[in-house]
Amino acid sequence: MSGSAMAINPGNGGGGSDCSVNRVSGSGAVFYVPSGGSGNYNILGWGNGTGGGSTTYRGLLESVAEQCILVAAATTASAGDGRAVESAVNQAKSRYSNIVGSDPKVCTSGHSQGGGGAFNAANRLDADCVIGVQPDTVFTTRISRPVASDVDVVCIFSTGDTLAPALPSNGRNCRTNSTRYTQETTSGSHFTPTSGDGGAVGRVMREYASRWLVE
């Protein structure tokens, strides 16, 4: 089943509202499909946090897709091993080959368990970049091995997060498993990404998605 999704304003992040978005269900995945941009689209693969589902991050993911990025989101609540995100991205490459081309750039991303799992998904997909949103790398996810040395990585933490804070372990684990690493700290609680377009956390996420997949 598919439905139209428009005009959650990305605010100050990323490349602005350039594309309209259609939300389409797949097999264990949901796709936020942009239209109206110029040229082929790149792909952001998404993994939910523990307990998250197909609509938990809808506002955030729509706001990313409005930047003319095709978002392939796994619907599982257990995205830590990266397999479900791998499947979502591969479905998107096949299903939307007419708008992503033969060799799109791929970023893996996710929140909490899915944020830690974005490293595992990147390894499975040979992705170009990782955007970890408040990634848990201690309790629900273990990063199985470092990503390749040419993979750009950012982990975004927030000052009010008591469930997956940067210190003492999560920031260190992100850094240990990546060579080209940036760490960002913003405001908000652990659940900020589940509301609206993700608040300050979502703004930083969109900035990196735009930088690596659009600009």
Image: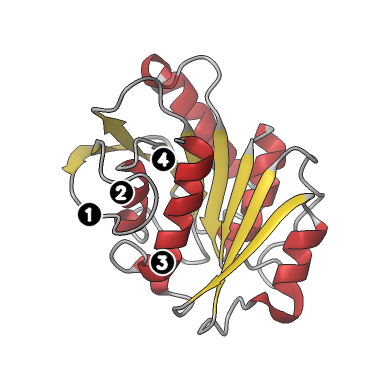
What's the residue at 46%, 36% (across, down)? Answer: 215
- Contact (CB < 8 A) between labels 3 and 2? no
- Contact (CB < 8 A) between labels 4 and 2? no
Mark 4 or 2, nearer chain start = 2
Which one is closest to the eye, mark 1 or mark 3? 1
Task: Please name whichever residue, 86 or 164, is drawn nearer the observer in this view of the structure.
Answer: 164
Cα separation, mark 3 vs mark 2, equals 12 Å
Picture quadrant where residue 72 is located: top left
What's the residue at 38%, 14% (across, down)? Answer: 98
Tell me which amino acid carries mark 3: Pro
Q: Which residue is mark 3?
A: 193
Q: Which residue is mark 4?
A: 71
Q: Say which mark, if any, is on residue 62.
A: 2
Instruction: Tell me where residue 84 appears, x and y as whole percent.
Output: 56, 43
Tell me which amino acid carries mark 2: Glu
Mark 1 or 3, nearer chain start = 1
Tell me which amino acid carries mark 4: Val
Q: Is residue 138 visible?
A: no
Task: Please name whichever residue, 15 or 66, is drawn nearer the observer in this view of the structure.
Answer: 15
Cα separation, mark 1 vs mark 3, equals 14 Å
Mark 1 or 2, nearer chain start = 1
Judge from the rendering whether residue 157 lies leftward or rightward of residue 75; answer left or right. Answer: right
Mark 4 or 3, nearer chain start = 4
- Contact (CB < 8 A) between labels 1 and 2? yes
Instruction: Tell me where residue 169 appears, x and y as whole percent.
Output: 75, 75
Which structural element holds mark 1? loop
**Considering only vertical position in the picture, is 95 above or below 171?**
above
Q: Which residue is mark 1?
A: 8
